Image: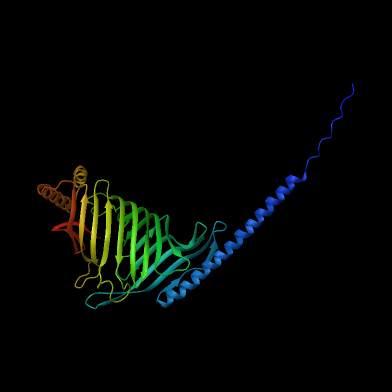
């Protein structure tokens, strides 16, 4: 029987995988060229930002000293690192009696990084790394360190200018009081809004704050959440500030596990006739009874802590006798700040510092 002839197999196209490989290599090389050119352009832009900032600081009387510029970050971002940064300059403040205070601001940082990132194309990210030291005049030095402390500066600053800020695992120590006086903040986010003429608005939200081991903490060392909204008056940095206009505390909310405080009011940072700020506020409190039970169970209260809690307990009883429906909340209590102490009537609530 005769076999039917079969058509020959079609030859395999041996060149297709090689062509595909050449295309992938060419595309990758082209992408690397584009990324490299973008990185060089971003590094040049960061240089321009720094070159533009230094003369502005000098014109304001500030001196900036740092090590050589170190470039990096390729390929994901462009960075410009300055090591051993030092910033020194004058700060003028005044009081209502006409007294002018000429103070000197000192800031030290192990490193300052300027970063351009594709994730934030409209901002130059300023990242302070390592330990920082800040002091103003004869005031105690503030030492800061943490996992991240950053601000987002627009490429082309113009007013009004928002400046978002963030911090993670931030530690703060005031003066040379030792490790028992360190405050830690797990997370902080917010913004500063510069509106011209010295107007500055501040909004911050902080989570998981651990107060220093030393000191008085009538409501507990751990603050679960704190939010701040404040407005500084016009004329910041002039001889008429901060004495002539008060600092407006639009909202300060402090939340412990049991107790929630809300404070609103105004404060004069440098009043005539005294070294301490003075202010008047309206205070609202929620969770008083739970806080009292927790404090009673702790059983280790100082005299000042006991006075603060007893004062709240007395006000709560007055509110209950007056027919208040919510017997665990106090509204619009008048609070004064003087002698570096927050006073609820004649009861000291909290000594600052």
- Does residue 96 appear to the left or right of 109 in the view shown? left
Question: In the image, is residue 74 above or below residue 196?
Answer: above
- Does residue 47 appear to the left or right of 282 in the view shown? right
Residue extending farthest to the right is: 2
Question: In the image, is residue 95 above or below residue 170?
Answer: below
The residue sitting at 65% across, 53% down in the picture is 28
- Does residue 198 appear to the left or right of 329 in the view shown? right
- Closer to the camera in the image, 54 or 155: 155
The residue sitting at 73% across, 45% down in the picture is 17
Q: How is the image coloured?
A: rainbow
Give percent across and percent down for residue 132.
Answer: 40, 62
The residue sitting at 63% across, 57% down in the picture is 32
Residue extending farthest to the left is: 321
The quarter in which the C terminus is drawn is bottom left
Give percent across and percent down for residue 216.
Answer: 23, 53
The residue sitting at 33% across, 62% down in the picture is 202
Question: In the image, is residue 144 above or below residue 271?
Answer: above
- Closer to the camera in the image, 282 or 112: 282
- Closer to the camera in the image, 102 or 252: 252
**Number of marks in the image?**
0
| Quarter holding residue 131 | bottom left
The quarter in which the N terminus is drawn is top right
Give percent across and percent down for residue 178.
Answer: 31, 57
- Closer to the camera in the image, 9 or 164: 9
Give percent across and percent down for residue 247.
Answer: 27, 66
- Does residue 160 appear to the left or right of 43 in the view shown? left
């Amino acid at each position: 029987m005769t076999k039917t002839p079969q058509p020959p197999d079609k030859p395999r196209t041996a060149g297709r995988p090689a062509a595909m490989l050449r295309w992938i290599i060419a595309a990758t090389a082209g992408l690397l060229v584009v990324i490299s050119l973008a990185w060089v352009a971003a590094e040049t832009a960061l240089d321009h930002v720094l070159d533009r900032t230094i003369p502005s600081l000098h014109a304001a009387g500030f001196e900036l000293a740092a090590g050589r510029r170190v470039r990096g970050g390729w390929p994901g971002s462009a960075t410009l690192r300055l090591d051993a940064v030092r910033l020194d300059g004058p700060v003028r403040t005044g009081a209502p009696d006409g007294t002018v205070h000429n103070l000197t601001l000192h800031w030290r940082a192990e490193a300052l990084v300027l970063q351009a990132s594709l994730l934030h194309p409209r901002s130059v990210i300023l990242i302070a790394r390592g330990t920082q030291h800040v002091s103003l005049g004869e005031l105690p030095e503030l030492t800061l360190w943490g996992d991240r402390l950053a601000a987002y500066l627009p490429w082309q600053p113009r007013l009004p200018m928002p400046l978002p800020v963030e911090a993670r695992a931030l530690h703060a120590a005031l003066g040379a009081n030792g490790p028992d006086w360190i405050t830690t903040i797990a997370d902080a986010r917010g913004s500063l809004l510069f509106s011209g003429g010295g107007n500055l608005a501040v909004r911050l939200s902080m989570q998981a704050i651990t107060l220093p081991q030393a000191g008085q903490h009538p409501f507990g060392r751990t603050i679960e959440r704190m939010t701040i909204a404040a407005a500084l008056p016009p004329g910041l940095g002039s001889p008429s500030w901060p004495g002539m206009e008060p600092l407006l505390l639009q909202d300060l909310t402090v939340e412990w596990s049991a107790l929630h405080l809300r404070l609103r009011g105004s404060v004069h940072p440098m009043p005539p006739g005294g070294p301490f700020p003075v202010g008047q506020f309206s205070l609202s409190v929620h969770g008083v009874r739970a806080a009292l039970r927790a404090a009673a169970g702790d059983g280790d209260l100082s005299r000042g802590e006991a006075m603060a809690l007893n004062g709240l307990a007395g006000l709560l009883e007055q509110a209950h006798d007056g027919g208040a429906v919510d017997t665990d909340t106090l509204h619009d209590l008048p609070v004064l700040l003087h002698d570096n102490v927050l006073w609820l009537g004649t009861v000291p609530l909290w000594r600052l510092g």
